[in-house]
């Protein structure tokens, strides 16, 4: 169905995010299992629980808009999740692989922040204030996760440098 109105675009973007978050719910346990660093492992598991909450917020947004909560394939998230899977499949457990997983996770967070910011802005201009508020809550959590990943990367990258013997 073509997207001809801003409301159509809002629904389409919400469907994309709904699918993206559900893909992430499947990927995060694998990333947590693959992580060597305890803080990274815990961070992935914490974000898994937050992501489940993001799906609940999206479901609530659909309800507020009188639409069924359903997704459409998010090709961007599919590609980002595949990058994380490659890091796991192609490399032995190490802090270097953890650094690679952090990079993959931060690309996911940046995609999500862009998508939630877009949806929030569209909801605002359409006067869907409750939907906009829900999307802002998720946007704030995605930003906090990105900052936490940056903090963890400082420790992981330094340890990976030592582990790998790079100069």
Image (cartoon, helix red, strand yellow):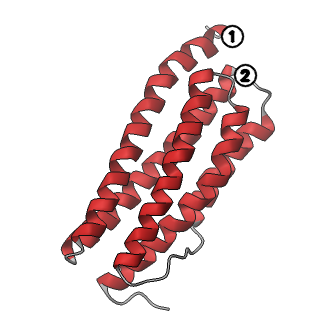
User: Is 15 left, or right, of 89 in this rendering?
Assistant: left
Residue 21 horizontal/vertical position (percent): 54, 58
Residue situated in front as seen by the camera: 85 or 61: 61
Q: Is residue 57 above or below residue 98?
A: below
Q: Say whether residue 34 is visible.
A: yes
At 51% from the left edge and 24% from the top edge, which residue is drawn? Answer: 153
Check disc 2 and report the residue beneath it.
Answer: 94
Q: Say whether residue 103 is visible.
A: no
Residue 74 horizontal/vertical position (percent): 56, 67
* Circle 2 Cα neighbour tier, 10 Å, few/some/many (<14 / 14–19 / ≥20): some
Q: Is residue 94 above or below residue 133?
A: above
Where does the C terminus fall, quadrant-wise? top right
At 66% from the left edge and 36% from the top edge, which residue is drawn? Answer: 32
Mark 2: which secondary structure?
loop
Residue 136 horizontal/vertical position (percent): 30, 56
User: Is 133 left, or right, of 11 in this rendering?
Assistant: left
Q: Say whether disc 2 or disc 1 marks the residue closer to the N-terminus.
A: 2
Residue 45 horizontal/vertical position (percent): 59, 38
Residue 163: mark in rendering: 1
Mark 1: which secondary structure?
helix
Residue situated in front as seen by the camera: 166 or 71: 71
Q: Quadrant of residue 42?
A: top right
The answer to whether the residue labelled 2 contacts the one labelled 1, judged by CB atoms less than 8 Å apart, is: yes
Q: Is residue 3 above or below residue 70?
A: below
At 72% from the left edge and 45% from the top edge, which residue is drawn? Answer: 85
Work out how far the residue at label 2 is from the one at label 1, CA to CA, in angstroms.
8 Å
* Circle 1 Cα neighbour tier, 10 Å, few/some/many (<14 / 14–19 / ≥20): few
């Amino acid at each position: 169905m073509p997207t001809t109105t801003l409301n159509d675009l809002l629904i389409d973007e919400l469907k994309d995010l709904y699918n993206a978050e559900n893909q992430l719910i499947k990927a995060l346990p694998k990333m947590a299992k693959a992580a060597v660093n305890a803080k990274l492992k815990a961070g992935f598991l914490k974000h898994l629980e937050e992501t489940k909450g993001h799906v609940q917020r999206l479901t609530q947004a659909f309800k507020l808009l009188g639409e069924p909560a359903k997704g459409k394939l998010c090709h961007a998230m599919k590609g980002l999740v595949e990058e994380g899977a490659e890091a796991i499949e192609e490399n032995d457990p190490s802090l270097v692989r953890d650094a690679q997983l952090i990079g993959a996770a931060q690309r996911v967070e940046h995609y999500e922040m862009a998508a939630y910011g877009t949806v929030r802005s569209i909801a605002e201009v359409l006067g869907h204030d409750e939907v906009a508020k829900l999307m802002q809550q998720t946007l704030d959590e995605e930003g906090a996760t990105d900052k936490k990943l940056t903090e963890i990367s400082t420790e992981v990258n330094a340890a990976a440098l030592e582990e790998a013997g790079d100069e």
